[in-house]
Image (tube, helix red, strand yellow):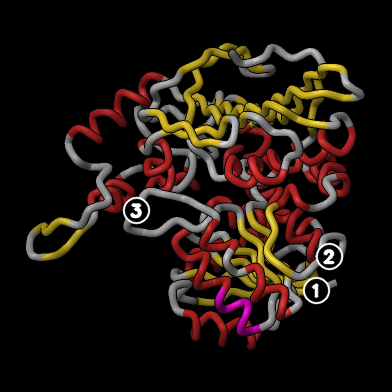
Amino acid sequence: MGKCLIIGAGGVASVAAAKCCQNSDVFSEIMLASRTKSKCDAIKTRLDNTKTKIHTAQVDADNVPELVRLFNEFRPCVVLNLALPYQDLTIMDACLEAGVHYVDTANYEPPDEAKFEYKWQWSYRERFEMKGLTALLGSGFDPGVTGVFCAYAMKHYFDEIHYIDILDCNGGDHGYPFATNFNPEINIREVSANGRYWENGNWIETKPMEIRRTYNFDGVGEKDMYLLYHEELESLAQNIKGIKRVRFFMTFGQSYLTHLKCLENVGMTSIEPLMYEGREIIPLQFLKAVLPDPASLGQRTKGKTNIGCIMSGVKDGKPLDYYVYNICDHQECYKEVGSQAISYTTGVPAMIGTMMIMNGTWKKPGVYNIEEFDPDPFMDALNKWGLPWVESFNPILVE
């Protein structure tokens, strides 16, 4: 049906490309573009026996003219941004100049500050409207599927949703003393920052890992989880009718937390530049270089993830509780696409969101978060493309 250009060549891009190739009726051609073309070529080699025609290219995602040249040469319908969050704005600029629709999985984050906020990308609304282009923000799992879950519940079950708790549990074990399941630089910045949640019109800030809860996850078991700030809280607080509080929790094992604290104490998680042997380095970027590549964890990782949303609100004046979640098996993901479940649960919805734009199911000019579109076709696609969901109307609530 059309062309998609994928920027990035990590674990998520590898999964998204594989799912695009499984869906060749929509994705007749894809291009993989990254600063390191050899990584794109390696993905292409694994997928070259599919009906989808695959191209590769080298591109600097920080360079708008270079991006525009590539977009104009390949002429994609949609650019799927799976690069670093620091590069969201340059890629959006290039999409505007080349007249291409835009999809990403994570909101913009300035490289010199561990802070994500949608204001930078939301400021592009008028420009995308004027160009007749769609920008879909946050089409991963969280953000992404979690927003679709909330929109689906709002559409079908609630008149108002008052409370949302997003629970992200990874019960997988990769065997390393310390490794991150996605980009180490982004992961460590995220979990070492102060926590935040939205309640009664205000943001409540907490210290990192200050709030802990224990929850028994279907398919995984009982795990400790910690309150973090996550970008979808900002958009859900604006887009869900009746919302009074929205929080995000993620599970961590004690070994991970102990190693992270030690690394923090010795300055290895810092994003402040320092001089080492006559050259400037950023400690966190150096740490990223010595940690295991998340894309290499697939074969080693065993266990399951469970990610979903618990919601409480009212329907016809009566209280209602609802829980919708997905369970994903690391080893099953590896058998299918050579990836662990963390990359899989992000790469599949990245493909689905792009498909929604490609086939015209979701297409209106402007910049939108994923919960602002009709959730039903996305929910159907989750079941079809590898992330089936489970519902409960009698969940255990998080205190």
Quadrant containing the N terminus in the rendered view: bottom right
- Residue type beneath disc 3: Glu
At a point 40% along the width and 59% down the height, the residue shown is: 110
Crowd class of label 3 (few under 14; some 14 to 19; many from 20; radius 10 Å): few
**213 or 42: nearer the viewer:** 213
- Residue type beneath disc 1: Gly
Crowd class of label 1 (few under 14; some 14 to 19; many from 20; radius 10 Å): some
Q: CA distance from mark 1 to mark 2?
A: 6 Å
Q: Dot 1: what SS?
A: strand
Q: Is residue 348 above or below residue 220?
A: below
Disc 2: which residue: 26
Disc 1: which residue: 2
Q: Quadrant of residue 265?
A: top left
The label shown at residue 217 is none
**257 or 318: nearer the viewer:** 318
Instruction: Kindly indicate whether the residue at mark 3 contacts the one at mark 2 (C-beta within 8 angstroms).
Output: no
